[in-house]
Amino acid sequence: ELPTVAFLGLGHMGGPMAANLVRAGYTVNGYDPVPAAQEEATKNGITVAEAATDAVRGAQVVITMLPNGKLVLDLYDEILPAAEPNTLFVDSSTIDVADARAAAEKARTAGHRAVDAPVSGGVAGAAAGTLAFMVGGSEDDFATAKPLLEAMGRKIVHCGGSGNGQAAKICNNMILGISMIAISEAFVLGEKLGLDNQALFDVASNASGQCWALTSNCPVPGPVPTTPANNDYQPGFAAALMDKDLGLAANAVRANGVEAELGLRAAELYHRFNTEGGGGLDFSAIITDIRDRSTA
Ligand code: NAD
């Protein structure tokens, strides 16, 4: 018998994720304060409740997909007392590692189980059921969560105890943010030196400069025809989300006294690009900012 799921936060990501659980045969009760999200969820077979506490009653698993850690912690305060004892709480939001650990601790203190399970793969991955989940929690809780995550994703990795899913996500995205800036700076330097973008690509993609930012999300149009650079930088992975994730990485860098100058600088550059209007573009559009700021 499949567990009954409460899904809280039916936005761009949560909506299609909950729909995939329905498709996999789960009974899904949901809640989101936004009427448009409620309507879409109802169409997808989710029973939308009047309040989060109502959605949680009778569920064995509660999944949250919310914008930030404060909302997760506040919602946990509201719903933990309403849940059946020993309910598994799965938070798939991208939030601070410290908030994720605090949320799991709250759940356990209230007599429940908890994992953090942030995702990568974006809205397209959520709709297609091909998300990657990075999971933090005990072996037992991971084992309980895994079949549900498999209904929404393709790659499920157990990263260790509570908060380690979030830790893996921000460490990966710190690599990605830094490497996209590195690739972009190199292309702009090459342009200034009279080097053809395709020539630099042909060299670097077969040499030690090779990385995902170059060969899968190349920031200049041409060398990789499928990348956002060939489509006016329509995302893809939006720069606003990179700004958010690098901000979380920067918080963790500072909180843990890590010497990560490039990670902190990447966070600053993406924050500036986002606040100056680039947030809706793919994060590879940072190259246009680097080019614009370069003197003639
Ligand atoms: P979103 O804003 O579209 O959805 C969040 C939803 O949560 C909204 O519909 C909002 O009304 C709802 N909500 C707010 N407070 C609530 C509450 N108390 N109870 C129930 N629902 C509540 O955001 P999204 O793009 O779906 O992102 C969700 C999370 O996933 C974020 O943490 C984000 O960083 C992460 N994420 C997003 C993407 C992406 O491509 N969009 C990719 C990976 C991870």
Image (spheres, rainbow, N blue to C red):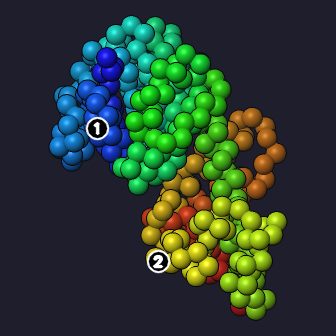
Q: Position of residue 205 (x, y in %)?
A: 73, 71
Q: Secondary structure at mark 2?
A: loop
Q: Residue at x 64, y 39 (%)?
A: 168
Amino acid type, residue under disc 2 in the picture:
Asp
Q: Determine which residue is flagged by label 1.
A: 23
Q: In which quadrant is the C terminus drawn?
A: bottom right
Q: Residues within 10 Å of mark 1 (few under 14, many from 20)?
A: some
Whether residue 270 can be seen here: yes
The residues tagged by marks 2 and 1 sit, at their Cα atoms, a distance apart of 34 Å
In the image, taking residue 184 as reference, residue 278 lies left or right, namely left
Front residue of this view, candidates 291 and 63: 63
Helix, strand or loop at label 1? It is helix
Question: Where does the image place residue 251, in percent across and percent down from the top left?
Answer: 65, 41
Q: Amino acid at mark 1?
A: Arg
Residue drawn at x 54%, y 23% is 142
State which tag comes first along the sequence, 2 or 1: 1
Residue 143 located left or right of residue 6: right
| Depth order, front residue of 218/288 | 218
Label 2 crowd (10 A; few <14 / some 14-19 / many >=20): few
Above-or-below relation of 275 to 83: below
Residue at x 65%, y 80% (from the top left corner): 291
Return the residue at label 2: 232
Which quadrant of the figure contains the N terminus?
top left
**Residue 196: horizontal and vertical position, in percent?**
71, 88
Question: CB of mark 2 within 8 Å of CB of mark 1?
Answer: no
Residue drawn at 50 percent across, 10 percent down: 109
> Is 151 or 42 nearer to us in this picture?
151
Quick check: 251 above or below 188?
Answer: above
Residue behind label 2 places its C-beta within 8 angstroms of ligand 1? no
Please state which of the two labelled residues, at mark 2 or mark 1, is closer to the viewer. 1
